[in-house]
Image (cartoon, rainbow, N blue to C red):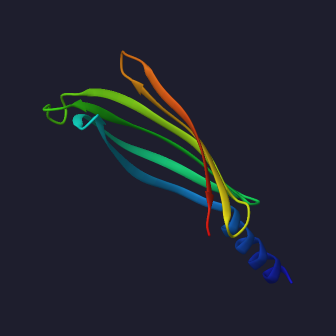
């Protein structure tokens, strides 16, 4: 009986905790049709599943490099992201996130996004 309970707990734990990850993000910024800058980031993250919600948190660093500048000559930044995704049913889901980039000695660039997705 103890083995059965242990197996059930292990399976339940695997379904509720997804764990840590590492990711990179590269943004190529343009104004009208002109390239202006690149923002490169590396982040550590952690994802957890609770009930029907998938929650995640990321933090890391990076650099904003203006057009025609080499890597290492740009402005450094700290990056943060918090979010949640919920699948309502097989056709409809929602994603909510807050993302911030704190540029060293400058400003905090941040946004909130809410996305919905409906499959036909």
Looking at the rendered image, the quarter that the N terminus falls into is: bottom right
| Quarter where residue 40 is shown | top left
| 48 horizontally vs 89: left or right | left
Q: Along the line of sight, which residue is nearer the eye, 31 or 90?
A: 31
Residue located at (77% from left, 60% from top): 51
Position in image of residue 26 (x %, y %): 32, 45
Q: Along the line of sight, which residue is nearer the eye, 69 or 49?
A: 69
| 44 horizontally vs 19: left or right | left
- Looking at the image, residue 80 lies above or below residue 11: above
- Looking at the image, residue 34 lies above or below residue 102: below
Q: Along the line of sight, which residue is nearer the eye, 82 or 28?
A: 28
Please tell me how many numbered marks the rendered image carries: 0
Looking at the rendered image, the quarter that the C terminus falls into is: bottom right
Residue located at (43% from left, 53% from top): 22
Position in image of residue 31 (x %, y %): 29, 32
Residue located at (83% from left, 80% from top): 2
Q: Along the line of sight, which residue is nearer the eye, 89 or 76?
A: 89
| Quarter where residue 29 is shown | top left
| 60 horizontally vs 33: left or right | right
- Looking at the image, residue 87 lies above or below residue 1: above
Residue located at (42% from left, 45% from top): 43
| 86 horizontally vs 61: left or right | right
Position in image of residue 52 (x %, y %): 74, 60
Position in image of residue 100 (x %, y %): 49, 32
Residue placed furthest toward the right: 1
């Amino acid at each position: 009986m103890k083995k059965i309970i242990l197996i059930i707990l292990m399976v339940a734990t695997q379904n509720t905790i997804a764990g840590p990850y590492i990711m990179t993000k590269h943004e190529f910024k343009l104004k009208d049709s002109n390239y202006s800058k690149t923002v490169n980031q590396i982040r550590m993250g952690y994802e957890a599943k609770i009930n029907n919600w998938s929650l995640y948190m990321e933090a890391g660093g990076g650099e904003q490099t203006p057009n025609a500048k080499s890597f290492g000559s740009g402005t450094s930044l700290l990056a943060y992201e918090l979010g949640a995704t919920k699948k309502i049913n097989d056709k409809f889901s929602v994603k909510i996130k807050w993302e911030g980039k704190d540029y060293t000695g400058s400003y905090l660039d941040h946004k909130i996004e809410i996305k919905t997705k409906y499959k036909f």
